[in-house]
Image (cartoon, coloured by chain):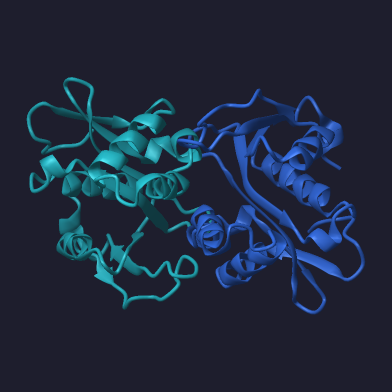
Chain colours: A cyan, B blue
Amino acid sequence: MIEDLPAGLTARHLSNDDHFRVLAVLDRWWGGLKGRAGSTERALLLPQLYFQHFTTTSFLVEHDSGEVAAFLIGFLSQTQPDTAYVHFVGVDPALHGQGIGSALYQAFFALAQSHGRRYVHCITSPENDASQAFHTRLGFAASAVQPDYDGPGLDRVAFTIDLSADPAAIR
Amino acid sequence: MIEDLPAGLTARHLSNDDHFRVLAVLDRWWGGLKGRAGSTERALLLPQLYFQHFTTTSFLVEHDSGEVAAFLIGFLSQTQPDTAYVHFVGVDPALHGQGIGSALYQAFFALAQSHGRRYVHCITSPENDASQAFHTRLGFAASAVQPDYDGPGLDRVAFTIDLSADPAAIR
Protein backbone atom coordinates (compact mmCIF):
# COMPACT_ATOMS: atom_id res chain seq x y z
CA MET A 1 0.00 0.00 0.00
CA ILE A 2 2.84 2.41 0.84
CA GLU A 3 6.30 1.93 -0.61
CA ASP A 4 9.65 2.92 0.84
CA LEU A 5 8.73 2.43 4.51
CA PRO A 6 11.62 1.49 6.84
CA ALA A 7 11.89 -2.21 7.73
CA GLY A 8 9.48 -3.32 10.46
CA LEU A 9 6.74 -0.87 9.50
CA THR A 10 3.56 -1.60 7.54
CA ALA A 11 0.68 0.59 6.39
CA ARG A 12 -3.03 0.02 6.11
CA HIS A 13 -6.17 2.14 5.89
CA LEU A 14 -7.54 3.57 9.12
CA SER A 15 -10.26 1.75 11.08
CA ASN A 16 -12.67 2.96 13.77
CA ASP A 17 -10.67 1.15 16.48
CA ASP A 18 -7.65 3.35 15.74
CA HIS A 19 -9.22 6.54 17.14
CA PHE A 20 -8.14 6.14 20.75
CA ARG A 21 -4.74 4.74 19.81
CA VAL A 22 -4.04 7.79 17.64
CA LEU A 23 -5.26 10.25 20.31
CA ALA A 24 -3.01 8.47 22.82
CA VAL A 25 0.16 8.78 20.72
CA LEU A 26 -0.62 12.42 19.93
CA ASP A 27 -0.19 13.28 23.60
CA ARG A 28 3.14 11.47 23.65
CA TRP A 29 4.36 12.83 20.30
CA TRP A 30 3.36 16.39 21.21
CA GLY A 31 5.05 15.95 24.61
CA GLY A 32 1.78 16.51 26.49
CA LEU A 33 1.85 20.12 25.23
CA LYS A 34 -0.62 22.30 27.17
CA GLY A 35 -1.63 19.40 29.44
CA ARG A 36 -5.27 18.33 29.61
CA ALA A 37 -6.39 21.42 27.61
CA GLY A 38 -3.93 20.53 24.84
CA SER A 39 -5.17 16.95 24.86
CA THR A 40 -8.76 18.17 24.47
CA GLU A 41 -7.73 20.59 21.71
CA ARG A 42 -6.10 17.77 19.73
CA ALA A 43 -9.12 15.51 20.32
CA LEU A 44 -11.44 18.24 18.97
CA LEU A 45 -9.36 18.36 15.77
CA LEU A 46 -9.66 14.57 15.46
CA PRO A 47 -13.22 13.60 16.38
CA GLN A 48 -14.16 9.97 15.89
CA LEU A 49 -16.00 10.85 12.67
CA TYR A 50 -12.72 10.79 10.74
CA PHE A 51 -12.16 7.20 11.88
CA GLN A 52 -15.69 6.25 10.78
CA HIS A 53 -16.32 8.13 7.55
CA PHE A 54 -12.94 8.95 5.95
CA THR A 55 -11.03 5.72 6.55
CA THR A 56 -10.48 4.79 2.91
CA THR A 57 -8.52 7.98 2.20
CA SER A 58 -6.54 7.78 5.46
CA PHE A 59 -3.55 5.67 6.46
CA LEU A 60 -2.05 4.22 9.62
CA VAL A 61 1.57 3.01 9.82
CA GLU A 62 2.34 0.47 12.53
CA HIS A 63 5.38 -1.34 13.87
CA ASP A 64 5.37 -5.13 13.63
CA SER A 65 4.53 -4.99 17.35
CA GLY A 66 1.31 -3.12 16.53
CA GLU A 67 2.52 0.18 18.01
CA VAL A 68 1.41 3.26 16.06
CA ALA A 69 4.28 4.84 14.08
CA ALA A 70 2.52 7.41 11.86
CA PHE A 71 -0.82 8.35 10.32
CA LEU A 72 -2.35 10.57 7.64
CA ILE A 73 -6.01 11.59 7.68
CA GLY A 74 -7.39 12.96 4.44
CA PHE A 75 -10.53 13.07 2.33
CA LEU A 76 -11.88 13.88 -1.11
CA SER A 77 -13.57 17.28 -1.32
CA GLN A 78 -17.33 16.93 -1.81
CA THR A 79 -17.57 20.51 -3.08
CA GLN A 80 -14.61 20.57 -5.49
CA PRO A 81 -14.46 17.44 -7.66
CA ASP A 82 -10.83 18.14 -8.60
CA THR A 83 -9.58 18.51 -5.02
CA ALA A 84 -8.49 16.36 -2.08
CA TYR A 85 -7.53 17.51 1.41
CA VAL A 86 -5.05 16.37 4.06
CA HIS A 87 -6.43 17.17 7.50
CA PHE A 88 -3.90 15.80 10.00
CA VAL A 89 -0.56 14.00 9.76
CA GLY A 90 1.62 12.68 12.55
CA VAL A 91 4.90 10.76 12.62
CA ASP A 92 6.51 9.44 15.81
CA PRO A 93 9.34 11.93 16.55
CA ALA A 94 11.67 8.96 17.11
CA LEU A 95 11.16 8.07 13.44
CA HIS A 96 11.60 11.52 11.90
CA GLY A 97 14.01 11.85 8.98
CA GLN A 98 13.29 8.39 7.55
CA GLY A 99 10.91 9.51 4.79
CA ILE A 100 7.74 8.18 6.44
CA GLY A 101 5.86 11.49 6.13
CA SER A 102 6.82 11.76 2.45
CA ALA A 103 5.75 8.18 1.82
CA LEU A 104 2.35 8.88 3.41
CA TYR A 105 1.81 12.01 1.30
CA GLN A 106 2.89 10.23 -1.87
CA ALA A 107 0.44 7.41 -1.17
CA PHE A 108 -2.31 10.01 -0.64
CA PHE A 109 -1.34 11.83 -3.87
CA ALA A 110 -1.62 8.57 -5.83
CA LEU A 111 -4.98 7.76 -4.21
CA ALA A 112 -6.28 11.27 -4.90
CA GLN A 113 -5.22 11.01 -8.55
CA SER A 114 -6.95 7.63 -8.87
CA HIS A 115 -10.14 9.49 -7.87
CA GLY A 116 -9.53 12.17 -10.51
CA ARG A 117 -8.24 14.78 -8.05
CA ARG A 118 -5.70 17.26 -9.39
CA TYR A 119 -5.16 19.53 -6.36
CA VAL A 120 -4.32 18.65 -2.77
CA HIS A 121 -4.73 21.24 -0.03
CA CYS A 122 -3.61 21.30 3.59
CA ILE A 123 -2.78 23.84 6.28
CA THR A 124 -0.31 24.27 9.12
CA SER A 125 0.42 26.72 11.94
CA PRO A 126 2.70 29.68 11.13
CA GLU A 127 4.96 28.68 14.05
CA ASN A 128 5.58 25.23 12.58
CA ASP A 129 8.71 25.90 10.51
CA ALA A 130 9.49 22.20 10.14
CA SER A 131 6.06 21.52 8.67
CA GLN A 132 6.40 24.42 6.24
CA ALA A 133 9.83 23.24 5.08
CA PHE A 134 8.50 19.69 4.73
CA HIS A 135 5.52 20.70 2.57
CA THR A 136 7.70 22.94 0.38
CA ARG A 137 10.12 20.04 -0.21
CA LEU A 138 7.15 17.88 -1.26
CA GLY A 139 6.22 20.45 -3.93
CA PHE A 140 3.45 22.37 -2.16
CA ALA A 141 3.13 26.14 -2.71
CA ALA A 142 2.58 28.07 0.53
CA SER A 143 0.27 31.05 1.10
CA ALA A 144 1.20 34.02 3.23
CA VAL A 145 0.16 33.65 6.87
CA GLN A 146 -3.64 33.99 7.02
CA PRO A 147 -4.66 35.54 10.35
CA ASP A 148 -7.65 33.92 12.10
CA TYR A 149 -7.95 31.42 9.21
CA ASP A 150 -9.64 28.78 11.38
CA GLY A 151 -11.12 31.16 13.95
CA PRO A 152 -9.95 33.84 16.39
CA GLY A 153 -6.25 33.32 17.11
CA LEU A 154 -6.03 30.26 14.85
CA ASP A 155 -3.68 31.62 12.16
CA ARG A 156 -2.72 29.23 9.38
CA VAL A 157 -0.48 28.87 6.32
CA ALA A 158 -2.35 27.17 3.45
CA PHE A 159 -0.58 24.77 1.05
CA THR A 160 -1.60 23.68 -2.44
CA ILE A 161 -0.05 21.25 -4.87
CA ASP A 162 -1.09 20.73 -8.50
CA LEU A 163 -0.43 17.03 -9.08
CA SER A 164 -0.73 17.38 -12.85
CA ALA A 165 2.05 20.00 -12.88
CA ASP A 166 4.33 18.09 -10.52
CA PRO A 167 4.41 14.43 -11.59
CA ALA A 168 7.61 13.97 -9.58
CA ALA A 169 5.51 14.33 -6.44
CA ILE A 170 3.90 10.97 -7.20
CA ARG A 171 6.28 8.08 -7.33
CA MET B 1 -34.54 24.38 -1.04
CA ILE B 2 -36.02 24.07 2.46
CA GLU B 3 -39.77 24.11 2.99
CA ASP B 4 -41.72 25.25 6.01
CA LEU B 5 -39.36 28.02 7.09
CA PRO B 6 -40.94 30.95 8.94
CA ALA B 7 -41.57 34.08 6.84
CA GLY B 8 -38.51 36.25 6.30
CA LEU B 9 -36.05 33.34 6.30
CA THR B 10 -34.42 31.71 3.29
CA ALA B 11 -32.01 28.79 2.95
CA ARG B 12 -29.08 28.13 0.67
CA HIS B 13 -26.02 25.90 0.61
CA LEU B 14 -23.02 26.98 2.65
CA SER B 15 -20.19 28.98 1.08
CA ASN B 16 -16.60 29.61 2.18
CA ASP B 17 -17.45 33.19 3.20
CA ASP B 18 -19.88 31.89 5.82
CA HIS B 19 -17.17 30.48 8.10
CA PHE B 20 -16.50 33.60 10.15
CA ARG B 21 -20.17 34.59 10.24
CA VAL B 22 -21.09 31.18 11.68
CA LEU B 23 -18.25 31.24 14.24
CA ALA B 24 -19.40 34.72 15.28
CA VAL B 25 -23.02 33.71 15.94
CA LEU B 26 -21.90 30.58 17.79
CA ASP B 27 -20.36 32.77 20.49
CA ARG B 28 -23.59 34.73 20.75
CA TRP B 29 -25.91 31.70 20.61
CA TRP B 30 -23.82 29.81 23.18
CA GLY B 31 -23.77 32.96 25.36
CA GLY B 32 -19.97 33.21 25.21
CA LEU B 33 -19.81 29.97 27.20
CA LYS B 34 -16.30 29.39 28.63
CA GLY B 35 -15.04 32.70 27.19
CA ARG B 36 -12.07 32.68 24.82
CA ALA B 37 -11.36 28.99 25.50
CA GLY B 38 -14.96 28.12 24.62
CA SER B 39 -14.70 30.18 21.45
CA THR B 40 -11.54 28.30 20.46
CA GLU B 41 -13.18 24.96 21.30
CA ARG B 42 -16.13 25.72 19.00
CA ALA B 43 -13.77 26.95 16.27
CA LEU B 44 -11.80 23.68 16.47
CA LEU B 45 -15.05 21.75 15.90
CA LEU B 46 -15.79 23.91 12.86
CA PRO B 47 -12.53 24.43 10.98
CA GLN B 48 -12.77 26.23 7.67
CA LEU B 49 -12.50 22.92 5.80
CA TYR B 50 -16.23 22.29 6.30
CA PHE B 51 -16.96 25.59 4.56
CA GLN B 52 -14.68 24.63 1.66
CA HIS B 53 -15.21 20.93 1.07
CA PHE B 54 -18.67 19.99 2.42
CA THR B 55 -20.74 22.97 1.29
CA THR B 56 -23.12 21.06 -0.99
CA THR B 57 -24.41 18.90 1.88
CA SER B 58 -24.65 21.82 4.30
CA PHE B 59 -27.22 24.59 4.68
CA LEU B 60 -27.34 28.16 5.94
CA VAL B 61 -30.61 29.90 6.87
CA GLU B 62 -30.58 33.70 6.76
CA HIS B 63 -32.96 36.53 7.55
CA ASP B 64 -33.91 38.82 4.68
CA SER B 65 -31.42 41.23 6.29
CA GLY B 66 -28.63 38.71 5.73
CA GLU B 67 -28.23 37.87 9.42
CA VAL B 68 -27.50 34.21 10.15
CA ALA B 69 -30.52 32.39 11.62
CA ALA B 70 -29.48 28.73 11.53
CA PHE B 71 -27.13 26.25 9.88
CA LEU B 72 -26.57 22.51 9.39
CA ILE B 73 -23.20 21.06 8.46
CA GLY B 74 -23.23 17.52 7.15
CA PHE B 75 -21.50 15.22 4.70
CA LEU B 76 -21.77 11.91 2.90
CA SER B 77 -19.67 9.16 4.47
CA GLN B 78 -16.74 8.19 2.23
CA THR B 79 -16.33 4.88 4.06
CA GLN B 80 -19.97 3.75 4.25
CA PRO B 81 -21.83 4.25 0.94
CA ASP B 82 -25.22 3.93 2.67
CA THR B 83 -24.53 6.55 5.34
CA ALA B 84 -24.58 10.33 5.78
CA TYR B 85 -23.50 12.32 8.84
CA VAL B 86 -24.66 15.55 10.51
CA HIS B 87 -21.68 17.19 12.21
CA PHE B 88 -22.98 20.47 13.66
CA VAL B 89 -26.37 22.21 13.80
CA GLY B 90 -27.22 25.58 15.28
CA VAL B 91 -30.42 27.62 15.45
CA ASP B 92 -30.61 31.15 16.87
CA PRO B 93 -32.11 30.68 20.39
CA ALA B 94 -34.52 33.55 19.61
CA LEU B 95 -35.99 31.35 16.85
CA HIS B 96 -36.31 28.08 18.77
CA GLY B 97 -39.67 26.30 18.64
CA GLN B 98 -40.48 27.35 15.08
CA GLY B 99 -39.49 24.11 13.37
CA ILE B 100 -36.31 25.45 11.78
CA GLY B 101 -34.12 22.65 13.14
CA SER B 102 -36.60 20.02 11.90
CA ALA B 103 -36.76 21.68 8.48
CA LEU B 104 -32.95 21.61 8.22
CA TYR B 105 -32.79 17.92 9.16
CA GLN B 106 -35.59 17.02 6.75
CA ALA B 107 -33.79 18.83 3.94
CA PHE B 108 -30.61 16.91 4.81
CA PHE B 109 -32.53 13.59 4.92
CA ALA B 110 -33.95 14.24 1.45
CA LEU B 111 -30.50 15.19 0.12
CA ALA B 112 -28.93 12.10 1.71
CA GLN B 113 -31.59 9.87 0.14
CA SER B 114 -31.02 11.46 -3.26
CA HIS B 115 -27.41 10.25 -2.90
CA GLY B 116 -28.55 6.72 -2.02
CA ARG B 117 -27.93 7.10 1.72
CA ARG B 118 -30.16 5.08 4.01
CA TYR B 119 -28.71 5.91 7.44
CA VAL B 120 -27.95 9.27 9.03
CA HIS B 121 -25.74 9.48 12.11
CA CYS B 122 -24.99 12.30 14.51
CA ILE B 123 -23.88 12.78 18.12
CA THR B 124 -24.58 15.09 21.03
CA SER B 125 -23.33 15.69 24.58
CA PRO B 126 -25.00 13.68 27.36
CA GLU B 127 -25.79 16.96 29.19
CA ASN B 128 -27.78 18.29 26.23
CA ASP B 129 -31.27 17.05 27.11
CA ALA B 130 -32.95 19.38 24.62
CA SER B 131 -30.85 17.99 21.78
CA GLN B 132 -31.63 14.41 22.79
CA ALA B 133 -35.38 15.11 22.94
CA PHE B 134 -35.20 16.88 19.58
CA HIS B 135 -33.42 13.99 17.83
CA THR B 136 -35.80 11.43 19.34
CA ARG B 137 -38.80 13.43 18.07
CA LEU B 138 -37.23 13.43 14.59
CA GLY B 139 -37.12 9.62 14.64
CA PHE B 140 -33.48 9.03 15.66
CA ALA B 141 -32.62 6.09 17.94
CA ALA B 142 -30.20 7.06 20.74
CA SER B 143 -27.31 5.00 22.10
CA ALA B 144 -26.44 4.80 25.78
CA VAL B 145 -23.93 7.45 26.89
CA GLN B 146 -20.54 6.48 25.43
CA PRO B 147 -17.76 7.66 27.78
CA ASP B 148 -14.74 9.29 26.10
CA TYR B 149 -16.39 8.78 22.69
CA ASP B 150 -14.52 11.69 21.09
CA GLY B 151 -11.52 11.66 23.44
CA PRO B 152 -10.77 11.93 27.16
CA GLY B 153 -13.73 13.61 28.89
CA LEU B 154 -15.66 14.05 25.63
CA ASP B 155 -18.62 11.73 26.33
CA ARG B 156 -21.27 11.48 23.62
CA VAL B 157 -24.70 10.02 22.84
CA ALA B 158 -24.83 8.64 19.28
CA PHE B 159 -28.01 8.86 17.15
CA THR B 160 -29.00 6.84 14.10
CA ILE B 161 -32.00 7.01 11.83
CA ASP B 162 -32.93 4.49 9.13
CA LEU B 163 -34.58 6.63 6.46
CA SER B 164 -36.01 3.60 4.67
CA ALA B 165 -37.83 2.48 7.84
CA ASP B 166 -39.10 5.96 8.71
CA PRO B 167 -40.46 7.60 5.56
CA ALA B 168 -42.40 10.06 7.73
CA ALA B 169 -39.04 11.63 8.61
CA ILE B 170 -38.75 12.90 5.03
CA ARG B 171 -41.44 15.24 3.91
Q: Quadrant of the C terminus of chain B?
A: top right
Q: Residue at x 48, y 59 (%)?
A: B49
Q: Residue A22 vs residue B8: left or right? A: left
**Furthest residue to the top?**
A65
Q: Residue B66 vs residue B99: left or right? A: left
Q: Residue B39 vs residue A82: left or right? A: right
Residue nearest the observer in this picture, A161 or A137: A137
Q: Is residue B144 above or below residue B77?
A: above
Residue B103 appears anywhere in the view: yes
Rendered location of residue B106, percent (x, y): 79, 45
Q: Exactly how many numbered labels are in the figure?
A: 0
Residue B118 appears anywhere in the view: no
Rendered location of residue A130, percent (x, y): 17, 61
Q: Residue B143 vs residue B19: left or right? A: right
Residue nearest the observer in this picture, B97 or A15: B97
Rendered location of residue A163, percent (x, y): 27, 60
Image-quadrant location for residue B39? bottom right
Q: Residue at x 24, y 63 (%)?
A: A128
Q: Residue at x 63, y 71 (%)?
A: B21
Residue nearest the observer in this picture, B45 or B125: B125
Q: Residue at x 35, y 47 (%)?
A: A35
Q: Quadrant of the N terminus of chain B?
A: bottom right
Q: Is residue A52 above or below residue B101?
A: above
Image-quadrant location for residue A107? top left
Rendered location of residue A93, percent (x, y): 16, 44
